Amino acid sequence: MEDNQLSPEERVERQEKYARLSQALRRLSPIQQELIQLRYGNDLHFAEIAAMLAKPEGTLRKLLMRTLRQLRMPYNQLERGK
């Protein structure tokens, strides 16, 4: 749904969710933030990220899984603490 199709209340709720997600992302380590950005922001494959960061693909896959798990916890806490 595009922003211009949202009600004012829905726009505010969306902005609040983005703010909570941004806050949760800032709590991650720099390498975790970079991995999230490269994988989802830049839509890179693990092979490309591994080459850029000079780390094994498997290591990055495990790090991303741990990062997403770690990200869910503070994000969920922020969601509950609205």
Image (cartoon, rainbow, N blue to C red):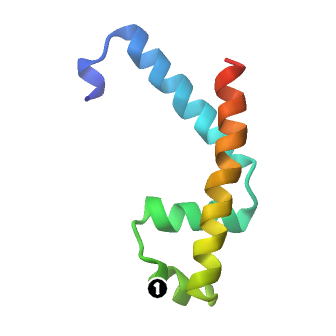
Expressed as whole percent of the image width and height from the top left, the position of residue 25 reads 65, 48
Q: Residue, x 66% and y 59% (percent of image)?
A: 67
Q: Quadrant of the C terminus?
A: top right
In the displayed structure, 16 sits above or below 45; it is above
* Corner quadrant of residue 55: bottom right
Report the number of discs: 1
Q: Secondary structure at mark 1?
A: helix
In the displayed structure, 29 sits above or below 21; it is below
Q: Quadrant of the N terminus?
A: top left
Expressed as whole percent of the image width and height from the top left, the position of residue 63 reads 66, 70
Mark 1 sits on what residue?
Answer: 47
In the displayed structure, 21 sits above or below 38; it is above
Q: Is residue 71 left or right of residue 57?
A: right
Answer few, some or many: residues within 10 Å of disc 1's Cα (few below 14, many 20 plus, some between 14 and 19).
Answer: few
Q: Residue, x 26% and y 29% (percent of image)?
A: 2
Expressed as whole percent of the image width and height from the top left, the position of residue 19 reads 59, 31
Q: Is residue 5 left or right of residue 31?
A: left
Q: Amino acid at mark 1?
A: Ala
* Corner quadrant of residue 11: top left
Q: Residue, x 61% and y 40% (percent of image)?
A: 22
Q: Is residue 55 left or right of residue 1?
A: right
In the displayed structure, 75 sits above or below 52; it is above
